[in-house]
């Protein structure tokens, strides 16, 4: 996952706009990826996952895109709402490990302006 | 279902004191994990368990011990707290090694 030091990158969007949050992962052998949402003072919450045999997966208002060639993952949120304001981070896993070891990025802070 | 719960939510310790953080899950998950989250960094795995009675070290195990005496509970112990252990601690659980992890609400620990 990405390492961005002490300060998280921030994405500010207007309510109703679409948001795109990016994640560069490091291990070319990673084959399972998850996006988590973490609101202030709370634990991470699962949003959507994707396995490496897919390049796109859609959920409710969210889409994850996987580009294995450049080791890049993105999360698209449609019609962003104030309740979407949170830190979003990706997690990658190499399934050759049998204890479910994930590597977590430090995240991107999404600010939704009303 | 309550999911994954953690106690306490907040704690302040003095250097050298000990404490135990409790994690409980009611989803009958086999796997449980303890992570720490520090500013600007991703979650780092401290210890994990693949079933009742088993524990193993993660990436940052030093200064911590764990126990999984019951399937639903995973305890994280700090025998002699140090300021470097100031962090937010998250417990998580999963069905097995192939599925997503469900996280608790976290414990904010400050060591002075």
Image (cartoon, rainbow, N blue to C red):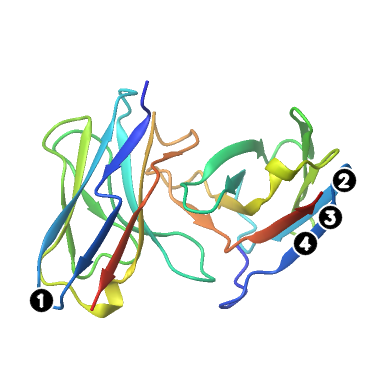
Q: Nearer the viewer, residue A13 or A21?
A: A13
Report, in whole angstroms, how far the alpha carbon at label 2 lies from the one at label 1.
49 Å
Mark 4 touches mark 3? (CB < 8 Å) = yes
Residue occupied by mark 1: B16
Mark 2 vs 4, N-terminal side: 4
Q: Chain of mark 1?
A: B
Pointer 3 and pointer 2: residues touching (CB < 8 Å)? yes
Q: Chain of mark 4?
A: A
- Mark 3 sits on what residue? A13
Mark 3 surroundings: few (<14), some (14-19) or many (≥20) residues within 10 A: some
Front one among B33 and B17: B17
Quarter placement of the C terminus of chain B: bottom left
In the picture, the disc for residue A11 is 4
Question: What residue is disc 2 on?
Answer: A18
Q: Quadrant of residue A24?
A: bottom right
Quarter of the figure with the N terminus of chain B: top left
Q: Secondary structure at mark 4?
A: strand
Q: Secondary structure at mark 3?
A: strand
Instruction: Say yes or no: labels 1 and 3 on the same chain.
Output: no
Determine the CA span between mark 3 and mark 2.
8 Å
Residue A29, percent across and down? 60, 53
């Amino acid at each position: 996952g990405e390492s961005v030091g002490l300060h998280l990158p921030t994405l500010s969007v207007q309510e109703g706009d679409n948001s795109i949050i990016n994640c560069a992962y490091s291990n070319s052998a990673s084959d399972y990826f998850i996006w988590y949402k973490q609101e202030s003072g709370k634990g991470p919450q699962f949003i959507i996952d994707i396995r490496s045999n897919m390049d796109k997966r859609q959920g409710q208002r969210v889409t994850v895109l996987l580009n294995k060639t450049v080791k890049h993952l993105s999360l698209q949120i449609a019609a962003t709402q104030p309740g979407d304001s949170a830190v979003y981070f990706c997690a990658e896993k190499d399934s050759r490990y049998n204890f479910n070891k994930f590597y977590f990025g430090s995240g991107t802070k999404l600010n939704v302006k009303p | 279902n309550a999911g994954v719960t953690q106690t306490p939510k907040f704690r302040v310790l003095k250097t050298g004191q000990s404490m135990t953080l409790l994690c409980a899950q009611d989803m009958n998950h086999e796997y449980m994990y303890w992570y720490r989250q520090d500013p600007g960094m991703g979650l780092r795995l401290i210890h994990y368990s693949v079933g009742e009675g088993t524990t193993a070290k993660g990436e940052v195990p030093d200064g911590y011990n764990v126990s999984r005496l019951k399937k639903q509970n995973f305890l994280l112990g700090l025998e002699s707290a140090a300021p470097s252990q100031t962090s937010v601690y998250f417990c998580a659980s999963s069905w097995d090694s192939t599925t997503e992890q469900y996280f608790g609400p976290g414990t904010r620990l400050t060591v002075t």
